[in-house]
Image (cartoon, rainbow, N blue to C red):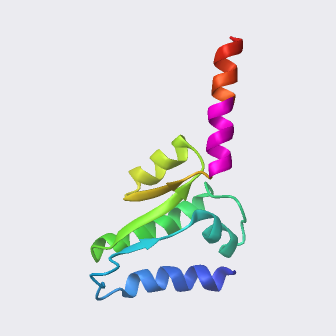
């Protein structure tokens, strides 16, 4: 992926004219976007947030539900505050790790 991909993704969101009733939504991954912008893994970088805001705004104008991915609660809340309507949260191993760590921490303390 490269910067051209990020530009195309933003451009496509701007050009949405008709949304299929079968699929009136879009999913935009911050990790893919950060990679495309040349700042891999920096999902909280101001440029990533700016581009996500553009996508969310354009999708809202066209009544397209927009979703994304978040690793943690703080990031999820941040994306929600920007207007993201649905979320893929963490990965199974991450959720299992955090829950197990919380249990151990509570048992030890």
Indicate the position of residue 21 as horizontal and vertical percent values.
27, 82
- Decide which of 26, 52 is in the foreground and name it: 26
Residue that appears at 52% across and 41% down: 73
Q: Is residue 87 above or below residue 101?
A: below
Q: Is residue 88 above or below residue 5?
A: above
Instruction: State which region is magenta.
Output: 92-100
The residue under the point 72% across, 72% down is: 38
- Which residue is depicted at the point 46% across and 54% down? 79
Name the quadrant of the C terminus. top right
Q: Where does residue 66 sit, x and y in percent of width and height? A: 40, 67
User: How far from the left and from the top, in percent, is residue 52?
Assistant: 49, 66
Instruction: Find residue 18 and report its image quarter.
Output: bottom left
State whether the magenta stretch is mostly helix, strand or loop: helix
> Does residue 97 belong to the magenta stretch?
yes
Residue 104 vs 21, above or below: the answer is: above
Q: Is residue 40 magenta?
A: no
108 or 4, which lies in front?
Answer: 108
Comparing 20 with 64, the one in front is 20
Name which quarter of the figure residue 61 lies in. bottom left
Q: Quadrant of residue 7?
A: bottom right
């Amino acid at each position: 992926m490269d910067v051209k991909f990020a530009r195309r993704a933003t451009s496509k969101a701007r050009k949405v004219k008709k949304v299929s009733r079968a699929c009136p939504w879009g999913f935009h991954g911050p990790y893919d976007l950060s990679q495309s912008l040349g700042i891999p893994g920096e999902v909280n970088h101001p440029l990533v947030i700016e581009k996500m805001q553009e996508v969310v705004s354009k999708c809202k104008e066209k009544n397209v539900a927009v979703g994304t991915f978040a690793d943690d609660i703080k990031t999820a809340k941040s994306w929600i505050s920007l207007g993201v309507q649905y979320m893929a949260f963490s990965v199974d191993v991450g959720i299992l790790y955090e829950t197990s760590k919380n249990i151990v921490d509570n048992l030890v303390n």
